Image (cartoon, rainbow, N blue to C red):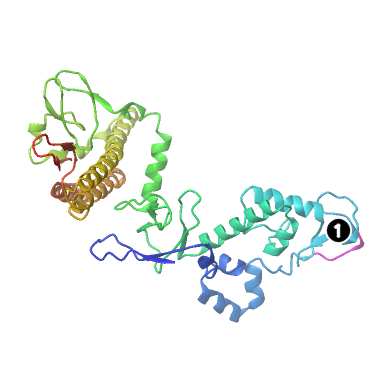
């Protein structure tokens, strides 16, 4: 167990704990807790009120209406309708009897489909839950039993309001918090960073439902947006094809030396101190009075506007990750040549990490802006956020270029501004 999130200087820090499998087992219980989402006070109150009703509601004890009365015909399996020996019939407390073979097939199919908690009686209109030991006795092979135990563990964790499974590939860590909120957590095992509430990539300042809507829309409209997914654009002056190989939007054509903005293709000189304006979508106020076709075109135009800027930040983050790796390699080389220590160069690593964090936050402002209703609030929010975020990013620099200096055998990092 390791406590995380203790940096008081980071406003996004969140107190959480990483638990391994054995540690998390200590805070997990069984079906009643799962059904009531681990609300112990609620369980105790309902138990004092009516213990039998509590067990019935949790589907661990049959209600009086679903019990079957044993008859001589109970020697016939209710599923396969075969006459079987009495000792091969199995039943839950609801007394719905079925042959062992049908029980085994029922459990095997559901476990292979990924079900843990929730396997119930096969009888129609009977929702009585099958206990863990009952299911395990019907599964053949340790591999299938282990799979069932993993599914149970997953369901127990997911039902607990203070726990979340790490979404990293094959990661066994469980994140525990005191107060469940949509905040950033990072796994100590696989370093996966995600939102605790929805387990998606961390997405501040946009809330979880909005991000889900945005990602779904991006997936649905991926073909429409394919044409803007390329890394190349034509120079607006000489029309030569230019490839974006850095995070900054300030581009210079290698042929004609024309400086322009990657996002809007406008002359960089005309951007002045408000170059973030090309990241603000200017809606048509009269679109509601136009035809449906015109409104559809405007909606597509708006989506592509925000998607292009979203995707641009995503690609810039990938490029800056490569630059960060080159910074690491260059620092290692200088340290090995006795040109300073790791501590001397630490500020560069910290600045590069902060740069990536700022760009990541900027990326997730676009879904927020896309779904925000038009009006004074949107104009004020877009303006203030653009100014503040731009000034903040400018303070730490934006595009990093690492190279050798032929004069003094050192390297340096130069900064340029982005939107």
Q: Quadrant of residue 22?
A: bottom right
Q: Residue 314 at what x, y percent from top left?
A: 31, 40
Q: Position of residue 371 (x, y in %)?
A: 31, 45
On screen, residue 212 versus residue 310, left or right, reads right
406 shown above or below 198:
above
Q: Is residue 259 visible?
A: yes
Residue 253 position, x and y percent, is 15, 24
User: Please, which residue is most extreme toward the bottom here?
Assistant: 48
Compared to residue 177, the image places residue 217 above or below, namely: above
Residue identified by numbered label 1: 88
Which of the image's four quarters has the N terminus? bottom left
Q: Quadrant of residue 189?
A: bottom left
Residue 187, picture quadrant = bottom left
Q: Quadrant of the C terminus?
A: top left
Residues in magenta? 68-73
User: Residue 207: x, y in percent?
Assistant: 34, 53
Q: Is residue 251 above or below residue 398?
A: above
Mark 1, Cα crowd under 10 Å, few <14 / some 14-19 / many 20+, is few
Instruction: For mark 1, give the secondary structure.
Output: helix
**Is residue 398 one of those drawn in magenta?**
no
Q: What residue lies at 79% left-to-right and 52% top-to-bottom?
A: 102
Tell me if residue 373 can be seen: no
**Along the line of sight, the residue nearer the viewer: 59 or 26:** 26
Q: 352 and 262: which one is in front?
A: 352
């Amino acid at each position: 167990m390791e406590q995380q999130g203790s940096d008081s200087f980071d406003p996004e820090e969140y107190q959480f704990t990483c638990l391994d499998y054995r540690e998390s087992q200590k805070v997990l219980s069984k079906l009643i807790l799962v059904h009531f989402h681990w609300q112990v006070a609620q369980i105790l109150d309902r138990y004092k009120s009516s213990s039998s009703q509590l067990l019935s509601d949790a589907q661990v004890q049959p209600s009086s209406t679903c019990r079957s009365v044993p008859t001589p015909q109970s020697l016939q399996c209710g599923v396969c309708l075969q006459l079987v020996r009495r000792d091969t019939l199995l039943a839950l407390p609801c007394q719905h009897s079925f042959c062992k073979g049908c029980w085994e097939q029922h459990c095997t199919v559901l476990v292979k489909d990924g079900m843990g908690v929730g396997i119930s009686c096969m009888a129609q209109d009977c929702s009585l839950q099958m206990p863990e030991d009952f299911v395990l006795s019907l599964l053949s092979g340790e591999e299938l039993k282990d799979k069932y135990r993993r599914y149970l563990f997953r369901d127990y964790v997911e039902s607990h309001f203070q726990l979340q499974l790490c979404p990293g590939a094959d990661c066994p860590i469980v994140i525990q918090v005191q107060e469940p909120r949509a905040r950033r957590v990072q796994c100590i095992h696989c370093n996966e960073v995600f939102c605790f509430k929805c387990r998606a990539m961390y997405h501040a300042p946009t809330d979880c439902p909005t991000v889900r809507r945005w990602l779904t829309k991006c997936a649905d409209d991926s073909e429409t947006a394919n044409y803007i997914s390329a890394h190349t654009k034509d120079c607006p002056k000489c029309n030569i094809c230019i490839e974006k190989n850095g995070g900054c939007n300030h581009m210079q054509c290698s042929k004609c030396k024309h400086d322009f903005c990657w996002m809007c293709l406008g002359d960089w000189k005309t951007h002045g101190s408000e170059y973030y304006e090309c990241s603000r979508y200017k809606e048509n106020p009269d679109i509601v009075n136009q035809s449906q076709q015109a409104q559809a075109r405007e909606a597509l135009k708006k989506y592509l506007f925000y998607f292009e800027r979203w995707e641009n930040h995503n690609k810039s983050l990938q490029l800056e990750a490569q630059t960060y790796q080159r910074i690491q390699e260059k620092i290692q080389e200088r340290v090995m040549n006795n040109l300073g220590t790791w501590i001397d160069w630490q500020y560069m690593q910290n600045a590069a990490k902060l740069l990536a964090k700022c760009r990541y936050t900027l990326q997730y402002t676009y879904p927020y802006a896309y779904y925000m209703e038009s009006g004074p609030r949107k104009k004020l929010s877009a303006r203030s956020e653009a100014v503040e975020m731009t000034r903040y990013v400018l303070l730490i620099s934006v595009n990093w270029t690492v190279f050798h200096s032929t004069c003094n055998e050192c390297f340096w990092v130069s900064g340029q501004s982005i939107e």
